[in-house]
């Protein structure tokens, strides 16, 4: 059995990855070892399941009737 709605699943997977701050090694790579910067400073899309909803719209289906 396959996934019935692969587009919705892909959007949910991407949104699930956007719930974390940037990793510590990314901060060290960008600013170097001398800087002490919080990982949230370089995180662009920060999501929360309670604060920001995804609003995934259902896919538009073709109308098969002629009326």
Image (cartoon, rainbow, N blue to C red):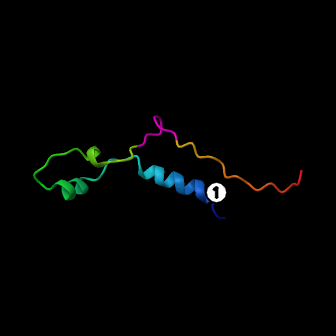
Residue 63 versus residue 37: which sits nearer the camera? 63
The N terminus lies in quadrant: bottom right
Q: Quadrant of residue 41?
A: top left
Side (left or right) of 41 relative to 17: left
> Residue at position x 67%, y 52% from top?
59
Q: Quadrant of residue 29?
A: bottom left
| Secondary structure under the numbered disc 1 in the rendered image | loop
Residue 48 versus residue 65: which sits nearer the camera? 65
The answer to whether residue 16 is magenta is: no
Q: Report the magenta stretch's main SS.
A: loop
Q: Which residues are magenta?
A: 47-53
> Residue at position x 49%, y 54% from top?
13
Side (left or right) of 1 relative to 51: right
Side (left or right) of 26 relative to 4: left
Residue 11 pos. (x, y %):
53, 53
> Residue at position x 47%, y 39% from top?
49
Residue 23 pos. (x, y %):
28, 53
For label 1, the residue is 5
């Amino acid at each position: 059995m396959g996934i019935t709605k692969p587009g919705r699943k892909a959007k949910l997977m991407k949104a699930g990855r956007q719930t974390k701050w940037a990793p510590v090694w990314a901060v060290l790579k960008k600013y170097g070892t001398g800087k002490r910067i919080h990982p949230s400073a370089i995180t662009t899309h920060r999501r929360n399941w309670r604060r920001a909803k995804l609003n995934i719209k259902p896919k538009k289906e073709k109308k098969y009737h002629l009326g």
